[in-house]
Amino acid sequence: MAIRAKKKVNGKWQPSGSYLVDVVTKTVGRIVKATGIFPTTKNAREKLEQVKLMLKDLDISRDEQRLTQIKLGKVKLLDALAAYQSGRVSAIEAYAGDALLPSMTKWLQTYSSSPYTLTQYTEFIKRLQRLGLVTPSTRVREIPDVVRALKAKMNREGKAIYFRSVRQMFISYTKTGLGYDADSMILKELKKISLIPVRSRREHHPFAHFHELIELGQRINSSGRWGNRTVDYRSWVFFMTLTGIRPTEFERGAWERDTKTGHIRIKGTKTVNANRVVPNIIWLPAEPRRLANLQMRLINLHPPTPIRCRDFRRSAALFYEAAGIPRSRYSYYLGHGHRDITGIYERHTPTTAQLDADRAKILKWIDEQRQNKPVKQPRVWSPTAKAFLEELYES
């Protein structure tokens, strides 16, 4: 006889809810669970027998993992039955039938990685929704299908790095959010999806000389808006070029005034050498910014320019070297690690005096570059580096 839960109505106990299954297994003991099968369900009795047969087979095979998940309610019996009847017992996994969006949203609320990664993952999920790859009806078990569909789209658009990041987000979610291990079928299927080969990297185009930096600053439209604020993109370009900050560090606003030296401390996290102090040539308030708009302005300039945001950092290395700063110090300013044994002995944290001296060298070099103006330069340059920096903020 099929068993149903009961509730008290007008002082009398009456059947309520779906049928219960009550079986005793040798593997995990007694299992009493609601089946989700109601009296109105088509072929209800037959499905109840199928659920019992499934539990018996799992018990005979001593499948402790899946029986435990069923017993704890991490796997719904009808979801397990569907996987069992399709011959995919390995697909019986915890939370596989849960809605994906609420589950991932809850995971992100407790995600302990950096704020930048958290923001990035949140944007990934929103974009997957806009693309229609993830909907409110999408289930956890469909993650591999979502990733396969995204791979096909990103492969056509040539966005290998973006796909790699989204794939890694789902791997992190299945491991830390769902607690899946190496035996998880969903995780195995996810890892089987290969990465998109990265196309040959774009050639580097650092500024050949200082006047190219000035010229680009003149050409960029600095009247852009971000939210309710007017954005001065020229100050972004000058700050990134004269500090050598990484684009990701700039987007996070990862710098502050160093209290000990008075210069700029970049709070990088990419490597152990990323937390560093650089000469304070130009200051920009430390706050999160998005480089996407600046990147699009660079792409759409007329006449076109091959320079992109990553080239500002490469230009810094050339400018530091041209200003006469020793390689051991400008390598430190860029946050690079040592390349050889000699580099280990050369590397040291610059003192306040050395930072001040390197700042003076760069300013002197800027002065010299301004004196050697290109032929037919339409603009009259500021006579000193100090005047140039004042002019930058006035314009």
Image (cartoon, rainbow, N blue to C red):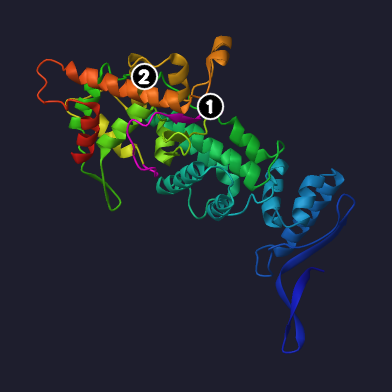
Name the residue located 23 percent from the left edge and 21 percent from the top edge: 367
Query: Left of 376 or right of it: where is 212?
Result: right
Mark 2 highlights which residue?
320
Q: Which residues are magenta?
A: 272-289
Q: CA distance from mark 2 to mark 1?
A: 18 Å
Q: Is residue 304 visible?
A: yes
Amino acid of disc 1: Asn
Q: Is residue 54 visible?
A: no
Mark 1 highlights which residue?
273
Near-viewer residue (55 or 373): 373
Give me the disc on residue 392: none
Amino acid of disc 2: Tyr
Tell me if residue 300 comes above or below residue 47 in the rendering: above
Query: Left of 139 or right of it: where is 224?
Result: left
Disc nearer the start of the sequence (2/1): 1
Near-viewer residue (131 or 341): 341
Which quadrant is home to the C terminus? top left
The outermost residue toward the bottom is 10
The outermost residue toward the front is 353
> What crowding class fits label 2: few (fewer than 14 Cα within 10 Å), some (14-19), or many (20 or more)?
many
* Rendered location of residue 204, percent (x, y): 35, 18
Name the residue located 33 percent from the left edge and 20 percent from the top edge: 361
Q: Helix or strand or loop: what does disc 2 sit on?
A: helix
* Rendered location of residue 84, percent (x, y): 71, 47
* Rendered location of residue 187, percent (x, y): 64, 38
